Image (cartoon, rainbow, N blue to C red):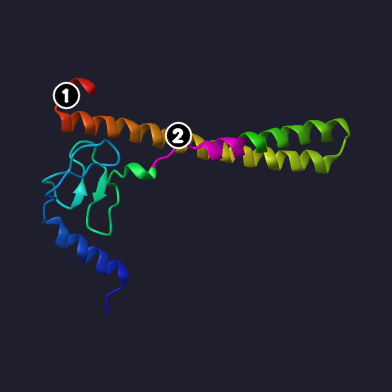
Amino acid sequence: MLGSRDVERLNDEVWTDRRIGHNVYCANCGFNLRHAPYVGDCHECGQPYNARPLAMKGIFSPHEAHVPVGEVLLSALCLFVGVSMIVGGARAQQDYAVFGGACFAALGAGWGWTAANRARRYFKSRAIQRQIVAEESGDEDLF
């Protein structure tokens, strides 16, 4: 009996010989994968992709990137609370407040890291969108 990984591998092998007939772009560099196999590596950057229907891994999807407003606000709030607790706990010599503040500060740093990664993805997505518009309009100077 075949497992789910075996079925995925067989599907990928079937789709590797077929060619993409419409504009689909690499999620990493924005290269147009039209006429490339449905499953393979990008000819421009070498990143793997899977443009098989229902798979779509490594394929540019502009709706996936967004401005990380919520993550930035959570990060700022957690860092503010954490630093306030650390300072207040240190002044009052309360170890539990310092520990709690350190936990909040670590949580804020984690949200900050998430916000930075989402912002990087957002700006990369915007650059790829500009590249696609320039390619479709035929204006090479927009790159």
State the image quarter where residue 118 is shown. Answer: top left
Span highlighted in magenta in the image: 65-75
Label at residue 65: none
Task: Assess disc 2: are there few (<14), some (14-19) or many (≥20) residues with their C-alpha within 10 Å of its C-alpha.
Answer: some
- Residue 91 lies, in percent from the top left, at 86, 30
Q: Mark 1 vs mark 2: which is more N-terminal?
A: 2
Compared across the picture, whether 5 is left or right of 52 comes to right
Rendered position, 65 above or below 21: above
> Residue at 66% across / 34% down in the picture?
79
> Residue at 22% across / 32% down in the picture?
133
In the rendered image, the quadrant that contains the C terminus is top left
Label at residue 139: 1
> Residue at 24% across / 30% down in the picture?
131
Frontmost residue, 57 versus 1: 57
> Residue at 81% across / 40% down in the picture?
97
Residue type, numbered disc 2: Ala
Rendered position, 99 above or below 51: above
Which residue appears farthest toward the right when viewing the image?
A: 92
Task: Assess disc 1: are there few (<14), some (14-19) or many (≥20) residues with their C-alpha within 10 Å of its C-alpha.
Answer: few
- Residue 123 lies, in percent from the top left, at 38, 31
In the rendered image, the quadrant that contains the N terminus is bottom left
Q: Disc 2 designates what residue?
A: 119
Considering the numbered disc 2 on the image, is that residue within a helix, a strand or a loop? helix
> Residue 56 magenta-drawn?
no
- Residue 61 lies, in percent from the top left, at 31, 45
Residue type, numbered disc 1: Asp
- Residue 26 lies, in percent from the top left, at 25, 42
> Residue 72 magenta-drawn?
yes
